[in-house]
Image: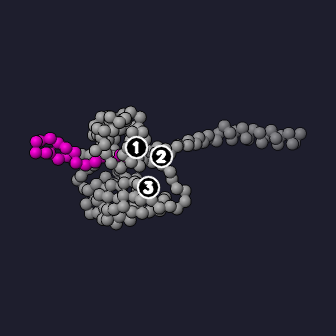
């Protein structure tokens, strides 16, 4: 009888624990098109814009964006530190072929325009698909709020874009739309 009470108490305790304990769901996200080297390999990362020593750097896999900026001598005096704080995840991991671009103070990406001799406004800044805000993406030809949202969602799920042509993998962006924006986008 004593043994039966013990089993009953254990069974009730297990049932209570299963009902109270939060259920943990794990989502596995396929990282399409990006092969991550689990070992320590070398990758090339292009760091440009308002850094002390812009250039292409050979780094170990697993290095963070902050480390790549340090390799490039850090932010220059002209760097837009507020933009970096808002738009650049310095804890993010770099990958082979990645471009990190830091804009200069007063040259917000996507909003700097120049006027040509025939009074036409031409954008002279590329929109970085990996760092652009919703509003900056909406400045691209043919990109509205919904499409900008899909671009941001794609880059978050896939840890960014590796090359500009990868934007065609975003639902709704085909060859025609890509042709309209290809000269205005970068990574």
* Label ID, residue 96: 3
Residue stretch rendered in magenta on the structure: 113-130
Under circle 3, the secondary element is loop
Which residue corresponds to mark 2?
33
Query: Between residues 3 and 109, which one lies in front from this camera angle?
Result: 109
Cβ atoms at labels 1 and 3 below 8 Å apart: no
Categorize mark 3 by other alpha carbons within 10 Å: few (<14), some (14-19), many (20+).
Answer: some
- Cα gap from disc 1 to disc 3, whole angstroms: 15 Å
Relative side of 37 to 122, left or right: right
On screen, residue 73 above or below 91:
below
Query: In the picture shown, does residue 75 fall above or below 143?
Result: below
Residues at marks 2 and 1 touching, judged by CB atoms closer than 8 Å: yes
* Mark 2 or mark 3: whose residue is earlier in sequence: 2
How many numbered circles are shown?
3
Q: How far is the residue under mark 2 from the one under mark 3?
A: 12 Å
- x and y percent of residue 89 in the render? 40, 53
**What crowding class fits label 1: few (fewer than 14 Cα within 10 Å), some (14-19), or many (20 or more)?**
some
Whether the magenta-drawn stretch holds residue 119 is answered as yes
Residue under numbered circle 1: 166
Residue lying at 55% horizontally and 59% vertically, measured from the top left: 39
Colour mapping: one colour
- Counting from the top left corner in percent of width and height, residue 165 is at 37, 43
Quadrant including the N terminus? top right
Residue at image x 73%, y 41%?
Answer: 13
Tell which circle, 1 or 3, labels the residue nearer the N-terminal end.
3
> How far apart are labels 2 and 1 at the CA level?
9 Å
The image quadrant that residue 15 belongs to is top right
Residue at 17% from the left image edge and 42% from the top image edge: 121
- Callout 1 secondary element: helix
């Amino acid at each position: 009888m004593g043994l039966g009470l013990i089993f009953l108490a254990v069974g009730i305790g297990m049932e209570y624990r299963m009902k109270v304990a939060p259920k943990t769901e794990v989502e596995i996200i396929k990282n399409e098109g990006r092969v991550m080297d689990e070992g320590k390999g070398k990758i090339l990362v292009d760091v440009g814009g308002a850094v002390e020593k812009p250039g292409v750097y050979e780094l170990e896999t697993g290095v963070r964006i902050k480390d790549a900026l340090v390799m490039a001598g850090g932010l220059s005096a002209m760097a837009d530190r507020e933009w970096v704080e808002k738009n650049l995840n310095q804890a993010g991991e770099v990958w082979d072929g990645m471009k990190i671009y830091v804009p200069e103070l007063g040259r917000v990406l996507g909003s700097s325009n120049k006027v040509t001799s025939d009074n036409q406004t031409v954008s002279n800044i590329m929109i970085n698909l990996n760092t652009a805000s919703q509003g900056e993406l909406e400045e691209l030809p043919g990109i509205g709020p919904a499409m900008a949202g899909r671009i941001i969602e794609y880059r978050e799920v896939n840890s960014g874009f590796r090359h500009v042509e990868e934007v065609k993998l975003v639902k709704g962006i085909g060859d025609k739309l890509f042709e309209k924006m290809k000269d205005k986008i970068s990574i």
